[in-house]
Every structure is written in C-alpha cells, then in structure tokens.
Image (spheres, helix red, strand yellow):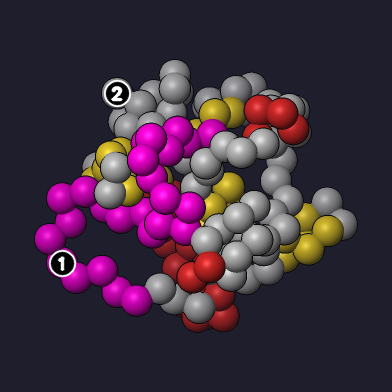
Amino acid sequence: IDCGADAGGVRLVVSGLRPYYTLEQMHDRLVVVVCNLKESKFQGVMSFGMVLAAKSADGSKVELLAVPEGSVVGERVKLAGFEGAFPAGLTAARMKKLKAWEAVAPDLRTDEAGVACWKALPLCTAAGTLTADSLVSSPVS
C-alpha cells in the first residue's frame, strides 16, 4: 500500500480482508492505514501497518472506511472539531511502549450516520469525513 513519502512510501500491510474484498476491489483504492504501529507477523508475514475498517457486531460484514474524494495519499487523518494542537506522530516503538493504540482503539466507531469517529469526534482529511457505506454504530479497527 502506498502510504505517502512521509509515512515510508510503499508498505507491505497484511490484513484479514480477503473474505470481504477481492484484489480488484482493493486495487487503486484509497484506504486509511495506521502506519505508526510496531511491525508484526500476521498470517506468517511481517506487516507494517493496519487498514481501518468498520465491522458488524457479529463480524459477518466488514467495510473499509471510505476516504473522501480529493484526499491525498499520505495525508494525515485528523479529528474534526478538535481544538487542541495535534502532537507530532509517535514512532512505532513509542506507540508500543505507551500502548497508545490500545487506549485509542476502543473508542473508534461509526456513528448513527456511518461517520467514523473517535469519542464522537469525526475522523477527517482536508477533503471531508471518513465513512462506512452501511455499517452504523459499529466498531472500527
């Protein structure tokens, strides 16, 4: 996946999306990738990121977060309405040490309109908000 020059360029990202998406559906599609996680072995292959998707409560349906048209490869996702300063990105080692992902992940979900949020703050790029096509009030991971 091309994550943009600032995020290390092209990365090998292993996911559990194969039952839900074909290679053709993934090709040239903009996706949201968490890039500052410590690399880990997934299905026997080292993975250098995680693709974000909404998931139904029973796990039977998974939808990649839709990235607004006009978003740029490598663009950092932000929280709409967040008034504080955004900190510089944490390194993978620091993320692991602080258990930052474990602290953030439980509050990532889609709202009743399908907008991906963290603690009710919409996730967005400069072009607009990230959404799930049909999964509302669902966890995002």
Instruction: Residue at 54% x, 34% y: name it.
Output: 64
Q: Position of residue 87 (x, y in %)?
A: 29, 74
Query: Label 2 sits on what residue type?
Result: Ala
Residue indicated by mark 1: 84
**Residue 75 position by quadrant:** bottom left
Query: Label 1 sits on what residue type?
Result: Gly
**Residue 84 position by quadrant:** bottom left
* Sequence-earlier tag: 2 or 1: 1
Asked if the magenta segment contains residue 43, the reply would be no
Magenta extent: 64-88
**Left or right of 110: which side holds 53?**
right
Instruction: Residue at 64% x, 22% y: name it.
Output: 60
Instruction: Say few, some or many: other residues with alpha carbon within 10 Å of mark 1 (under 14 / 14 to 19 / 20 or more).
Output: few
Vertically, is 40 above or below 92? above
> Quick one: 21 or 100, which is closer to the camera?
21
Instruction: Residue at 58% x, 47% y: name it.
Output: 51
Residue 130 visible somewhere in the drawing: no
Report helix, strand or loop for mark 1: loop
Number of marks: 2
Asked if the magenta segment contains residue 83, the reply would be yes
